[in-house]
Amino acid sequence: MSGRVTDVLMTQAMRWFGPRDPVPLAHIRQAGATEVVTALHHIPNGMVWPREDIAAHRALIAAAGLGWTTVESVPVHEGIKTAAPNRDRLFDHYAATLRNLAAEGVTIVTYNFMPLLDWTRTDLAWELPDGARALRFELEAVAAYDLHILKRPGAEADYAPEVVERAARRFAGMDDEARGRLERTIIAGLPGSEESFTSAQFLDAINGYADTGPDQLRANHIAFLEAMCPVAEECGIRLVVHPDDPPFPIFGLPRMVSTEADVTALFAAVPSMANGLCFCTGSFGVRADNDLPGMVRRLGERIGFLHLRSVQREPDGAFHEAAHLEGSAEMTSVVAEVVALQRREGRSIVMRPDHGHQMIDDLNKLTNPGYSLLGRMRGLAELRGLERGLAYGRAN
Ligand code: CS2
Ligand code: MN
């Protein structure tokens, strides 16, 4: 292989959901990853991750010949997002977890600051023309659920009149089974979300945000960073925030990590370099006004972790997850910016193919939505080839 000895390439990782993940560590290694990105999913949100549990998790990973530098995620408790009375105790727990992770060799900790829900989709098995399956989001399906199943008071004001109309037609055309499936898809605790709800509990939880509008949510996020960044700095950890997915308010809940201006405001408020970004092209890329390559160029020094995937934007606020080099994200330009960033700073950034299509033999397997092996393996292979072509091709 030719290339410049000075070239630094991305560190290739895949997400692993722990011993219960249907994808074993050996397969992740065979896919060419050198690291996993993982979390202790058995620890309830808000509790301290014990050092022994972290060490045991690392031992499993090391035994498979893989490394672990990046946690995804240490979830931020709703009490922190809403500045509840027990917030200080939750801060203490989060800080203790950071110290324990650092003591066991972790350097990057991912989190998000989305109220209640992590990523939201309305179809987890949308069939593509080639027979593979993808995750898809339709605004009118969200509205159908919100207005006719959840029956959230005041919801109508959050949608354009034509969306309300389409949602009513959509709902009327669904049988009970389809309605139940939509409900489960939206609220049933997708991977990455540590809680799962019934619709009644979800409505209750939404009410818990009555006093937390957009400005308050940002203030609470800044308070979290002000409390955690000194601890992170001291123990050698970088916190990286994952953007909102999708990057706009949903179910009347605010979202404040959706655009370049949003993250720039966070960095200005808390300048510590421990305040970093998980640059997720799939999440930011839902909005046409997020200039992905430009964001890598301008925010590069803050980027501690890369999620590379592409969404195809569709009319009427819908999108689906495209193959990694297809769709609306200009992935070649994004990776070219990453190559330049790594060269400039002389560091390798951990990346993972964030989601993949369910395809080939995986179509007959039970999988975590978005996290079957073959689609991610294809994505990883394409991305690593693209990076080498860009990094070495130019040098020769
Ligand atoms: C992930 C998120 O699967 C995904 O879409 O990118 O679930 C991510 O892990 C969290 O939002 C980060 O806290
Ligand atoms: Mn992501």
Image (spheres, rainbow, N blue to C red):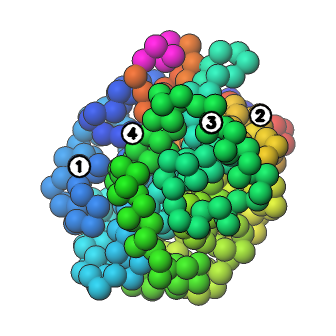
State the residue at coordinates (40%, 44%).
188
Give the residue pinned by disc 3.
172
Give the residue type that dot 4 points to. Trp
Q: Earlier in the sequence, mark 3 or mark 1?
A: 1
Q: Main secondary structure of the magenta part?
A: helix
* Separation of marks 3 and 1 at Cα, in angstroms: 40 Å
Give the residue pinned by disc 1.
42
> Is 159 displayed left or right of 314 in the figure?
left
Give the residue type that dot 3 points to. Ala
Please say whether residue 98 is one of the residues in the magenta stretch.
Answer: no
Give the residue pinned by disc 4.
16
Give the residue type that dot 2 points to. Glu
Q: Relative to the observer, which residue lies in front, 248 or 12?
A: 248
Q: Is residue 100 above or below residue 372?
A: below
Give the residue pinned by disc 2.
326
> Quick one: SS at disc 3?
helix
Q: Relative to the observer, which residue lies in front, 370 or 58?
A: 370
Query: In the image, which residues are magenta?
Result: 361-365
> Quick one: SS at disc 1?
loop
Q: Assess disc 3: are there few (<14), some (14-19) or many (≥20) residues with their C-alpha within 10 Å of its C-alpha.
A: few
